[in-house]
Image (spheres, helix red, strand yellow):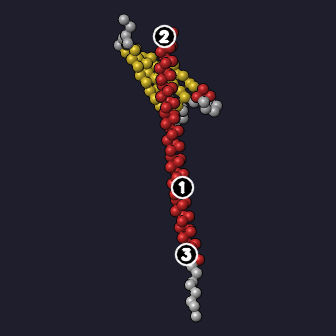
Amino acid sequence: MIARPKRRRGLTTVAVLALLVVLGLIASTIVGLGATYHSRSRARARALQSEALADAGLDRAFARLAADPDYAGERWEIPAPLLGLPPAEGPAAVVTIAVESEGGTRAIRVQADHPVDPERRARSSRRVVLPEKP
């Protein structure tokens, strides 16, 4: 009599399940990394926008001072459509400009917040001391 080998169907099922678990872990890790990179890139974009708004605030202050030497500053609220964002309630960014006198010199202080939401906010500041007039 010839002995027939026993079929091991259960062992194949276990191997396939183990492979699926490993593939699932790899896929979830890749998805998690993608979400992290996406979050970082959005935060970096907000930071770059905030820096550009702070520079724009300085330019705005220089222009206003050239037109009116008594300009003391302002709160500049920027709506979402001007930043290429969908319309929203309230401003998408706020730039605070203050012109301060310091012992005969003047200083411009600018703070830009984008977006206004404190949880996602990127804040940039600039300070420039103006030379004294001769």
N-terminal label among 2 and 3? 3
Confirm or deny contact between disc 2 and disc 3 (CB under 8 A): no
Visible in this render: residue 97? Answer: no
Give how far apart the Cα atoms at labels 1 and 3 are. Answer: 26 Å
Label 2 Cα crowd, 10 Å radius (few <14 / some 14-19 / many 20+): few
- In this view, 78 is above or below 36: above
Confirm or deny contact between disc 1 and disc 3 (CB under 8 A): no
Q: Secondary structure at mark 2?
A: helix
Residue underneath mark 1: 28
Q: Nearer the viewer, residue 51 or 72?
A: 51
Residue underneath mark 2: 66
Q: Secondary structure at mark 1?
A: helix
Furthest toward the bottom, the residue is 1
- Please state which amino acid type lies under the numbered disc 1: Ser
Q: Nearer the viewer, mark 1 or mark 3?
A: 3
Give how far apart the Cα atoms at labels 2 and 3 are. Answer: 83 Å
Residue 119: % across, % down? 51, 38
Residue 11's label in the rendered image is 3
Residue at 54% in and 35% down? 117
Q: In which image quadrant can residue 12 be found?
A: bottom right
Q: Quadrant of the C terminus?
A: top left
- Please state which amino acid type lies under the numbered disc 2: Ala
Furthest toward the front, the residue is 2
Residue 82: % across, % down? 60, 26
- Please state which amino acid type lies under the numbered disc 3: Leu
